[in-house]
Image (spheres, rainbow, N blue to C red):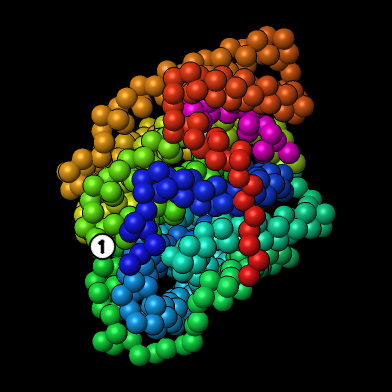
Amino acid sequence: MSTFDDERPEDERAGVLANSAVMAAGTVFSRMSGFIRSALLAAALGPALHADLFNIANTIPNMVYILVAGGVINAVLVPQLVRTMRSDPDGGDAYLSRIVTLAALFLGAVTLVLIALAPWAMDLFLDSDYSEPELADQRQSIIDFARFCLPQVFFYGMFVLVGQILNARGRFGPMMWAPIANNIISVGVLVTYLVVFGPARGAEIVGAFTPGQELLLGLGATLGIVAQFAVLVPYLRAAGVHYRPRFDFLHTGLGHTMRLAVWTVLFVVVNQIAYTVVVHLASGGTASDPDGTGYTVYQNTFLIMMVPHSVVTVSLATAILPRMSARAASDDRAAMSRTLAETLRTALSVVLPFALLLPVIATDLSHLIWGYGASSELFDRYAPSLALFGIGLVFFTVHYLVLRGFYALEMTRTVFWIQCAVAGTNIVVAMLLVREATAAETSPALVLAYSASYLVGSCLSYAVLRRLLGGLHTPALVRFLVRMAIVAGLATAAAAGTAYLLDSVADDESWILAVVRLTVVGAVDAVVLVALARAFHVRELTSMIETITRRVPVLRRP
């Protein structure tokens, strides 16, 4: 019997929030160190072509890992691990050992092939302008970076696999805290880079890198991912995991997992095809015009947009997936519906206010995070994309959480077809908008395409799962959204009014004033939001605040 089978609704709610608080705390610290990394990267490389060379190459390993294994590990294995822990005589140890062994062999082989084929692989992600003679040095730099960074494919895969094993056994904290190790190493590498080479200036903003610069940034980026994986390993034994290499893959239950994985792999394939198109279109924004916005601007603003998603939504989704998998195994669809509906409202209670506030603070936030060194005079390139990403965040949150219901039901084929609609919308809208956009408008156009795609995805996934579960407490969701629209709308109006008053008093563009405006505007928004949430009885938000304020999560030592 699962530990979740006899859990009362109120205990489940408290447990989900408590586990989410542990994960959220780790994510907050990780994101804070990530902000420092992002600021140093902008200070060293700027927001233009020079930065795109490194950022595109350093993103490819994560994209490839997701393409070849990420969906299977994230979406399929947790339900399967929960089931083998419930049903296998050895508590799932043999199944786990086979999965780890198979994953290590597969990821290692894929990594070696990719390193050998790096020049051809990068052509998929680069605009045709990179084939021109005047960009030959830049193209070579991005290929060199790819070879240094592609070993990350193996370590990304093993990190997520080990992290999901820990999650399935109720150890949610380590996976959320481990990326701090990566960020610490990245910060050290970037500080060293700034001391040795200095920030990019003048023509360097659109130029190639020297071999020494490529070696430091490329190997430093990979070392951070290695450390991120290594941090998790000691926690396996503390969680009761006893791994030994096993190569008896046939007739051991892996066939069921692989059949489920087929549709998840196809899901990831269409998703990554869409993202490849986005990277390709973004690379043209900076290759064709030194004043353009491309992948660096799109990626960095996307990471800011993902902060509440990572802190709140991912933490909640990770906490409920083992519960929902257990309920699905017991065919208790009413309990699944209740869990998912409550979690969706809880996530939106944070995401909606953040999305509404983003346009108000976009310029000052861009100044605070990226207004240094090589980007000191160019930080305003980030603001339009950052302001627009809030729209996509709301739709993505709904889509992301609803998909956990399909995964718990092992309906990966349905997820694939829904994601085809998402990816197709993203590709079509992105190509149409970028074709009509100027180079400076490339990144904002891609943000709008992202939002359109997840508008389609959230509506479609919600409607299908609602029918499957016999309801998702939609009337309660509508009532919640009405209250949140009032609460968050008034809080944002107060924040915008405060920003207007501050601008009328001092419109200076100094970094200090940007910090002051962000602090005051953010404080006003938060105070009004919490006060109105209590007045309008928005339990989802007030319960989360109470959980966080009374619980100081401490990561247990292995």
Q: Name the quadrant containing residue 238.
A: bottom right
Quarter the C terminus occupies: bottom right
Left or right, 161 with respect to 201, comes to: left
Dominant secondary structure (helix, strand or loop) of the stretch shown in magenta: helix
**Where in the figure is residue 19, as x and y percent of width and height?**
51, 52
Q: Nearer the viewer, residue 452 or 215?
A: 452
Q: Nearer the viewer, residue 49 or 102?
A: 102
Callout 1, which amino acid?
A: Ala
**Where in the figure is residue 174, as x and y percent of width and height?**
58, 61
- Residue highlighted by disc 1: 329
* Position above or below: 3 against 400: below
From which residue to which does the magenta span run? Answer: 352-372
Q: Name the quadrant containing residue 227.
A: bottom right
Q: Residue at x 23, y 54 (%)?
A: 332
Q: Secondary structure at mark 1?
A: helix
**Where in the figure is residue 141, as x and y percent of width and height?**
60, 61
